[in-house]
Amino acid sequence: MTRENQSSVSEFLLLGLPIRPEQQGVFFALFLGMYLTTVLGNLLILLLIRLDACLHTPMYFFLSHLALTDVSFSSVTIPKMLINMHTREQSIPYAGCVTQMYFFIFFTDLENFLLSSMAYDRYMAVCHPLHYTTVMGQGLCTLLVTVSWILSCASALCHTLLLTRLSFCVDHSIPHFFCDLGALLKLSSSDTSVNELAIFTAGVAVIVLPLICILISYGCIGVAILKVPSTKGICKALSTCGSHLSVVSLYYGTIIGLYFFPSSNTSRDKSTIASVMYTVVTPLLNPFIYSLRNRDIKDALERLLHRAKVLSQ
């Protein structure tokens, strides 16, 4: 019976953003501009880190993976949303929906692990500067990134396999602009207790634990900064952590507001708007945060532009 119900669901309907039809054109242009800026901004960071030898350090190694994750994360949801807004077509095939959900979970989890690894890198740089180059070698950095990719893949695969076991009712309209796992479970006519247990377990493993590690790292950094007697030393320590701390605050602040403090009034619209914050706005702002608050990135960009100018002459 379950297999029969599964095969009958050939597609889902993505209801999209809570905007009026006459506003579709304006929002299409807005989100298209934001998506292109996200892709170009993060690819520019990747290019700078790849070409500039001064940026071949552990911090920028993690940042390059974060930039790649942000590009991929945005590309999972935004292009499909733009196509639906342009064509007014809301359908998405069952296989496409499951695939989108898999990669959405994968890159969400990967971002959590990468932010945690970057916090540990900043902890070592501020609290143990003499041992930094020894501890944060290429081997450890590669290991942290590899483990992050493996754990993210395992988490996303677990949720996907559990979802494919479910059957779905006649109503297959998803009140979202992408295939959100929670919304899909609400449409299921099967018992979703195992899926909900997996969500809780994975949520602790990939959101709560990395956040705790980040808070502990910055707690230790804060204690170390208070022990620095000079104002110059404090400013230097803060400058090494400011960009990462801004990204962490923006990313986790949105997730906590969405999942831990849900609104009872018009929760569907507000949760959709909150989802836009961490799927569209956060990847868009990350390149600007790291470029505007980071002298190394600015210097690397100036060197790249100067090199391009010389070659053009």
Image (spheres, grey):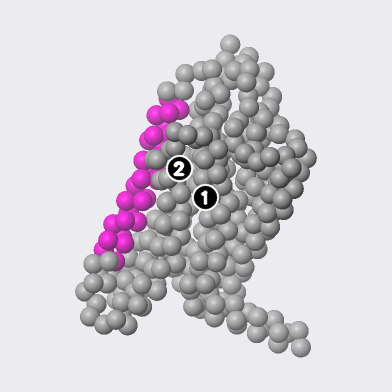
Q: Could you tell me residue 73's position as x and y percent?
A: 57, 50
Q: Quadrant of the N terminus?
A: top right
Q: Give the label, 2 or 1, closer to the camera.
A: 2
Residue 58, picture quadrant? bottom left
Give the residue at x 69% y 24%.
10
Question: Is residue 285 in view?
Answer: yes
The amino acid sitting under disc 2 is: Leu
User: Hey, what amino acid is under mark 1?
Assistant: Tyr
Could you tell me which quadrant the C terminus lies in?
bottom right
Magenta segment main secondary structure:
helix
Query: From the viewer's perspective, is residue 6 above or below residue 110?
Result: above
The span shown in magenta is: 194-221
Q: Residue at x 75, y 37 (%)?
A: 88
Please provide percent x and percent y for residue 98. 60, 33
The image shows residue 111 at horizontal and vertical percentages of: 48, 52
Residue 224 lies in magenta, yes or no?
Answer: no
Q: Are marks 2 and 1 in contact (CB under 8 Å)?
A: yes
Q: Is residue 58 left or right of residue 131?
A: right
Residue bearing mark 2 = 258
Secondary structure under the numbered disc 1 in the rendered image: helix
The residue carrying mark 1 is 278
> What residue is at 36 percent from the left and 51 percent from the top?
211
